[in-house]
Amino acid sequence: ILHEITNKIHEVRKTWYKLAPYWKASNASKKWKLIIYDAIVRSKLLYGLETVHLTDAMAKKLDVFQLKGLRQILRLQATFVNRAKSNKFVFEMASKTAYPDPQDKRVIPRFSEFHRERKASLLGHILRASDDDPLREVTFQPGTAYRVEYGKKRVGKPKQNWIHQTKKYVYVEKQHLFTYDETKAQDNQILKWAQERKF
């Protein structure tokens, strides 16, 4: 998957270069450059990725690619040149530039965070689906948020998987609760939140 992510970044980079005349246009404001970048580059890079679990290394590659583009548009030096221009500063400046109205609460999210939000949205869609929906049938047991078991569990530390990591994100990050252990009580709570459309 990491190899595929790298290839996809290379493909999107070609789109970035095709838009080079726009990035260099003197009559285009930084605000519109940021909005165009966020709309076109993000949608092309993350299209369909909500069905895949990304490791921290994979997610970091997405954010690094995004930061390079934002720094170029905002004309900010790299962190190793100017320590004050941290990654956090870049995102804050990009959000304020794209949405200057103090009443506008929108921000430009990290690509990795947007990816996790899309995964959570897909999880909610699957949990709300009827039991005869093919996607729900192969993912969860009828009427529950308990995942379907396929064969015996492997010996050793379990591999990271889409269902567990997405439910963990909903339980810990979105609802600000303690660690997710995939207990039935926790899964029942996640199912309830999905039915209430909290994600």
Image: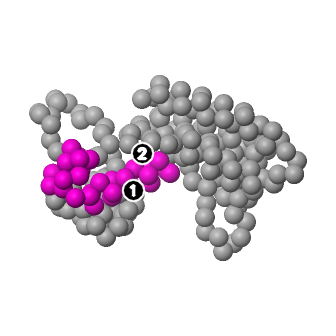
Residue occupying the far bottom of the picture:
103
Does the magenta portion include 133? Answer: yes
Toward which corner of the image does residue 195 lie, by quadrant? bottom left
- The amino acid at mark 1 is Ser
Residue sitting nearer the eye, 58 or 34: 34
Tell me which label, 1 or 2, sits earlier in the chain. Answer: 2
Prevailing secondary structure class for the magenta stretch in the rendered image: helix
Task: Specify whether 5 is left or right of 140.
Answer: right
Q: Which residue is mark 2?
A: 50
Residue under the point 72% across and 33% down? 17
Residue 142: % across, % down: 15, 55
Residue 180 higher or lower than 19, as above or below:
below
Compared with residue 99, is residue 17 higher up or lower down, i.e. above or below?
above
Q: Is residue 96 visible?
A: yes
Towards the viewer: 1 or 14: 14
Q: Position of residue 196 (x, y in %)?
A: 31, 70
The residue drawn where x is 72% and y is 43% is 71
Q: Residue at x 71, y 70 (%)?
A: 101
